[in-house]
Image (tube, rainbow, N blue to C red):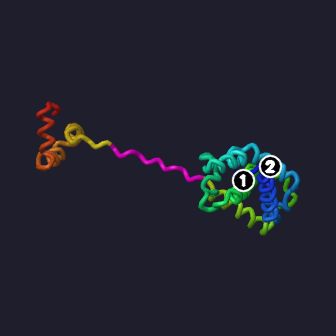
Amino acid sequence: MISQKRFVQIVTSASEQWRSKNRELFSCFDTEKLWERIHAFVDLEPDTDLGNFTKSLDFGEVSKKSIMRAAISEELFPDREERLAAAIELALDRAFLTLFDRGALSSLLVLEEIPPRGQKAMDRIASRVEAAKPTPKVQVAPPPQPVDPVAQCVKDFHELGMQAFKQKYMNDTRNRIFYETAIDRGLI
């Protein structure tokens, strides 16, 4: 279990490393206000809730709703503290990118456009957040119910022309049994 004091140290350290790594990008913004908005987003957004994440570290499983579930796994980060630091970085990446995409950071821009080095950091953040999104489960349609060959014969009797029906059911010995069964049941 990670103590509260160690948790604060890891959060502080990971946040500072994240800020340092993205320094070129953040120099384009009013950094004090940027940092406030990112922290507010991280605190309010359920996918980046670090409190729930640390609780799940103690129980061994990341919340199923969390975008961190696949990206911050025990296979990638066997140490709990490393997982926590990686989760913090991912949470901050997601917060920044979401706020930027929603236009919530446009008023904080101090430059006309983001320089190439800053754009490189932005692309790295975007690719990391995209990779962490859970893959949607593909809904597989149930296989169609097998068609009753006798019912199909009755349907074909009413829908096909006489020549086509005769060719399919009377001339084909494999299908003739279905025609005879339909007659025996009084369906045709």
Determine if residue 144 is in view: yes
Distance between the alpha carbons at the discs numbered 2 and 1: 10 Å
Q: Is residue 71 left or right of residue 176?
A: right
Q: Residue furthest top?
A: 186
Looking at the rendered structure, the secondary structure element under dot 1 is: helix
Residue contact between numbered discs 2 and 1, judged by CB atoms under 8 Å:
no
Mark 2, other Cα within 10 Å: few <14 / some 14–19 / many ≥20: some
Nearest the eye: 166 or 108: 108
Q: Which residue is mark 2?
A: 39
Picture quadrant of residue 92 = bottom right
Number of residue marks: 2
Could you tell me which residue is drawn at 88 percent across and 53 percent down? 32
Mark 2 and mark 1 lie on one chain; the one further toward the N terminus is: 2
* The one of 22 and 178 positioned closer to us in this rendering: 22
Residue beneath disc 1: 91
User: Is residue 37 part of the magenta span, yes or no?
Assistant: no
Q: Quarter-wise, where is residue 85 in the image?
A: bottom right
Q: Is residue 142 left or right of residue 162?
A: right
Name the spot of residue 114 as percent of width and height, x first: 80, 63
Dot 2 falls on a residue whose secondary structure is: helix
Q: Position of residue 123 (x, y in %)?
A: 71, 63
How many C-alpha atoms fall within 10 Å of the one at disc 1: few (<14), some, or many (≥20)? many
Q: Amino acid at mark 2?
A: His
Q: Indicate whether 92 appears above or below 166.
A: below
In the picture, measured across the screen, residue 162 lies left or right of residue 82, that is left
Query: Which stretch is magenta?
Result: 134-144
Q: Decide whether the magenta segment is chiefly helix, strand or loop.
A: loop
Q: Is residue 114 visible?
A: no
Residue 148 placed where, x, y %?
A: 24, 40
Identify which residue is drawn at 78% across, 61% down. 18
Instruction: Indicate the quadrant containing the C terminus: top left, top right, bottom left or bottom right.
Output: top left
Is 142 colored magenta in this rendering? Answer: yes
